Amino acid sequence: MKILRILERTTCGCLILVVLVILVAVGALGYFLAQRVDAAELPNPPAPIVYDLVLLSDQSHSMSECDGVGSDPELLRVQAAQLFISYLGADSGVGGYRLGLLHFGGTVQQAAPLTNVGDPAMRRQLSQVAENPQPIPWTDPLAALEAARTLLANDGRPGSRRAILMLTDGEPAWPDTVSRRVADYRQALAGLGEELVAEEVTLFIVHLDNPNTSCSQRVRLHWLGLWQEMAENTPGGALLTARRADDLLPLYHAIVRGLTGAVAGATLAEAASLPGDQPMIITATVEQPLASMTLVVWKEQPQTRVEIVGPDGLLLSPHSPGVIVAGDPGESHEEIWRVSNPPTGDWQIRLSGTGRVTVWQDRAPLPTPTPSPTPTETPTATATPTATATDSPTPT
């Protein structure tokens, strides 16, 4: 009997242990399956958007001198390019931007390969190589566009969005020693435009016009129609005309703002003269929650001091959380301040110094939440009516 009791206790203990093991296993399996279901229901985070961009800058002699005037003798195209570079750098926390810089006349010179503008040191190098461009005789925009297309094809990242921005006063010109028919040149340009469309490369052409020169008059007569067709056939491309060199800054700003996805840009000050003896205070209002706000300040004098004050009255620092500043205070003509999730209210831009200033406020709205699908009710099955048998008539 004693042996039987021992066996009975042992058997019960083993059964209890087996039951516990089974319960633990079932619980673990249920938890694992629940995690799998939860993971399946979570949307994949969106892949960061990457951009590969090329700036083509016309450095032909007509930019400095045509009929004794020139299209851009003060090199405002350099400041426009530097603003473009800094704006991309300030937005680099959202998109991955690489920018190449090509100068052209009758030949093409690569000033910089596709360069990561999110790196402050590399961004500074890009701005430096954009300065003091040397004139290049003659003008060959076909060769320039082909070089930009080749750079994107060879060095562009897979899946990147690609764009070319070409600044030119517009008239192709080559020496008499070069045998080239204008009709063939136009056909080659049109063919290149078709290749850009097929490769989904966006083309922006900024035509720097000067109606007082014979160069610009010939461009309007013979080339603008082709430039417009080439640009507007590409996805999101456009031909933009700067009536004077001063228009380059707002045009470059509009293009880069569109590329980065900012909307509702507002001009807070345009070529306003600083008083010199006291700060100029400009108000930028944030009326509703935003993903980001970008304040773009162009200064005629690089030494002009820029201070940003939030609605709480506190001075913003380049090291403040959610703040990215591009441009070199005291050295560059541009300062770009990007603030993520800016508090609503009135912000102040305080400008101290001399000379003219232009200030833009750009806004990026919060992403629109994707509505969750509403489950539809499962229709309730209804009973199919059964035909009731009727009595067969009794033959009479």
Image: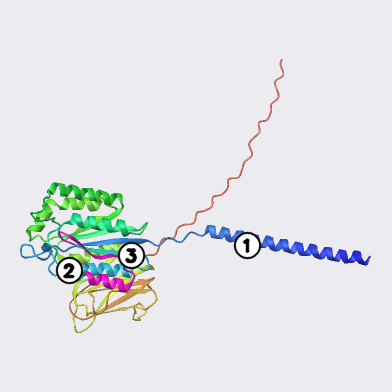
Residue at coordinates 25% horizontally, 63% vertically from top-left?
Answer: 254
Discs 2/1, front: 2
Q: CA distance from mark 3 to mark 1?
A: 42 Å
Secondary structure beneath disc 1? Answer: helix
Q: Quadrant of the C terminus?
A: top right
Q: What x and y, as percent, mark residue 166?
A: 21, 59
Asked which quadrant contains residue 278, the reply is: bottom left
Nearest to the observer: residue 200 or residue 286 = 200
The question of residue 168 being in magenta is answered with no
User: In the image, which disc is placed on residue 133?
Assistant: 2
Segment tinted magenta in the rendering = 104-129
The residue indicated by pointer 3 is 97
Mark 2 packing: few (<14 Cα in 10 Å), some, or many (20+)?
some
Residue at coordinates 30% horizontally, 49% vertically from top-left?
Answer: 198
Mark 1 packing: few (<14 Cα in 10 Å), some, or many (20+)?
few
Q: Earlier in the sequence, mark 3 or mark 1?
A: 1
Asked if residue 90 shows in the view, the reply is yes
Tell me the kind of residue under disc 3. Tyr
The question of residue 106 being in magenta is answered with yes
The residue at the far top in this view is 396
Q: What x and y, as percent, mark residue 36?
A: 57, 59
Secondary structure beneath disc 2? Answer: loop
Discs 3/1, front: 3
Tell me the kind of residue under disc 2. Pro
Nearest to the observer: residue 21 or residue 213 = 21
Q: CA distance from mark 2 to mark 3?
A: 23 Å
Q: Along the horizontal axis of the image, is 190 left or right of 30?
A: left
* Rendered position, 305 above or below 181: below
The residue indicated by pointer 1 is 31
